[in-house]
Amino acid sequence: MNQKTTLAAAIAATALFTLSHGTTALATDKAAAKVDYTKMKPEALAEYLVFESGSFDLEQPTQEGTNGRARLTQDELMQLCTKAARSKKGLDAKTADKIRAMAQATIKYPEGGIKLGDWKKGRDLAWSGFGFRTAHNPDKHGPNNPPGANCYNCHQLATDRTGGDLGPSLTGFGKLRGNSPEMLKYAYDVIYNPHVYFACTYMPRLGANGVLTPEQIADVMAYLFDPESPVNK
Amino acid sequence: MSNNTMRMLTVALAAAAVPGISTAKQPEEVLQELIAKHKSAYLTQSPQNMMMMPDNPAYELIDEGKKLFMQARGPKNASLEKCDFGKGPGVLAGAYVQLPRYFADTGKVMDLESRLVYCMQTLQGFTDEDPAIKKRHGSDSDMMKLQTYIASQSNGMAWNPPMKHPLEKAMRNAGEVLFYRRSANLDFNCAACHTQTGKRIRASVLPNEKVPQEWTRAISWPAYRVSHDHVRSSQHRVLECLWQMRYPNLKPGSDASIALISFWTDAARGQPAILPDLKR
C-alpha cells in the first residue's frame, strides 16, 4: 500500500470511529432494553459485560493518558493467550511461533547497546508494586514515586526480602549466568517482552507495555547483573 | 475433666457468646475440619490468624447487623424482615450459600450485596444517595454489618448456588470467560494467580480456583482482614483484585461483578463456607 492510500484508509477509519462513537450512548440504551443474556454465547456476553453493561468506568482516566476502555481492550497477544488459557489443549505450536514473532517485533534496543544502570535504583523498582493502579484508588505517579517493576511479587531475588514464587527464583542471577552480551540481551528481552521466549507467559511485557522506561529497565538489569547487587551476594 | 469435655465446654461457651451464629460450629472449627480433610498451604498459612479467629472482630458486626436488620428504618419505616434472599421472605438460614441467584421480581441474577440494596430500596425506601446504601465498605458501614449478619447464618453450610435458571448459567459462564480474560498494563487475568496450588505473591499463599477445598475459604466473605483492620465483602475482594490488575473502576453490584462472583461461588460448590472468616 502506498503512503497516499494508507493515509486515506486512516482518515476513513477515524471518520468511522468518530461516527460510531458519537452514537454509542443512544445505541447502548436501545441495546440494553433488548439484550437477552441467555441468548448470548459466554464469550459474547463477557465482552458485553465489559464494554456495554455499565459495569466498568470506561471513561476513567489512566496514568498513561488513556482511559478505562483502553485498559480493557485486548490486543492480539492478549486475545491469543486468553484463548490458549481457556483451551484444554493449551497453546498450540503454530500460535506460539506467531506470538514469539509478534513479541520480537515490539522490542526496541537502546542506542549504543544494552547497558547496566544503577542497581540501587533497580532494587527499589524491583521491590515496588506501585503504579498504574486505578479503580477505586488511583496511583499518583510523580518524580519521587515512579511506577515500580513488581519483580518481588513473583520472583525471589536478593534473599533479604521475601519474594513470590509464581515465577522462577532469580537469586544470584548475574553470578550464576555471567554477563556476556548474549545474556544481557536475553535478560533485556525477557524484561521488555518475555513472550519472545515464553509465549503466553504471565510475566508482564514491562517494556512493550510501557510499564518501565528504558532507564528503569537499565536499573533493573543492574540489580540482576551487578556484582555489587544484593541479588549476587 | 477430660481435655475433650473441656474443649466442648469452651466451644459451647464461645457459641453462647456469639448469639448471631446460626450453627453449632464456629467458623474456626469449620476451617479446622477442612484442614483435617485437605492439606493446603493456603488454608494453613497463618497460625497467628487462626489463633485470632475466636476473637474475630467481625462478630461484633453480626450483632450490630442483626439489630439493623430487625429495626424499622428508612423513609418507609420498615425492617428487613420481609426481604427475600431466595428462600422466602425473612429466611436467612442457608440463604447466602445459595447466592448469587435469579430473582423473578427483578429479572436479574443478584449477589448478597445487590439483593440487600434492592430490599433497602423497595422495603425501606432508601435511595442510592443515602449513606445506608451509598457507603459499601468499612466495618462501620451498615452494608458490612448487615452483610456479615446475613452471611453468618450460612456458616458451615455448603456453597450451593442454584444454577437452574438459564440466566444463572449464562452469568456463571460469562464469569468464567472473564476469569481468563487477559488485559490492562500487566496482561493479567484472574487465572494468573488462582489456577495453581501453593504459589505465593510475596509471602502470601494464593488460593487455587480449581481446588474447591481451598477455594471455599478464598470466597468466604465477609471476612475481617487483619491488614485492613476492616471487615470486607465479596464485592470488595473483586474490586481489589481488579485494582491490582490495573483495571478501571468496577461499579458495585454491576453485572460483570456478579458474573465473576457467580463463577467463583460455583467453583466452591459442596464445600463449607467459613462465615465470618478472618484473613490476612
Image: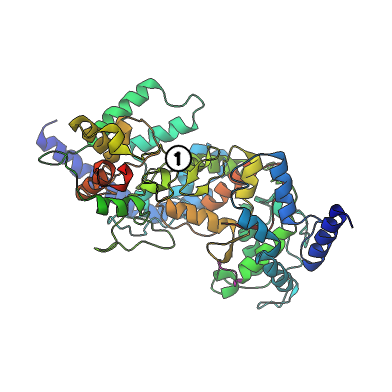
Chain of the residue on which disc 1 is drawn: A
Q: Nearer the viewer, residue A223 or A51?
A: A223
B128 with respect to A103 (left or right): right
Q: Decide whether the magenta segment is chiefly helix, strand or loop.
A: loop
Q: Give coordinates of residue A87: x percent, y percent.
A: 49, 28
Q: Residue at x 26, y 49 (%)?
A: A212
Q: Element under label 1? A: loop
A123 with respect to B227 (left or right): left
Q: Nearer the viewer, residue A4 or B102?
A: B102
- Relative to A90, is B271 above or below? below
Label 1 sits on residue: A166
Quadrant for the C terminus of chain B in the image: bottom right
B236 with respect to B151 (left or right): left
Q: Is residue B160 visible?
A: no
Give amino acid for label 1: Leu
Q: Which residues make up the magenta segment?
A: B136-141
Q: Residue at x 53, y 45 (%)?
A: B206
Quadrant for the N terminus of chain B in the image: bottom right
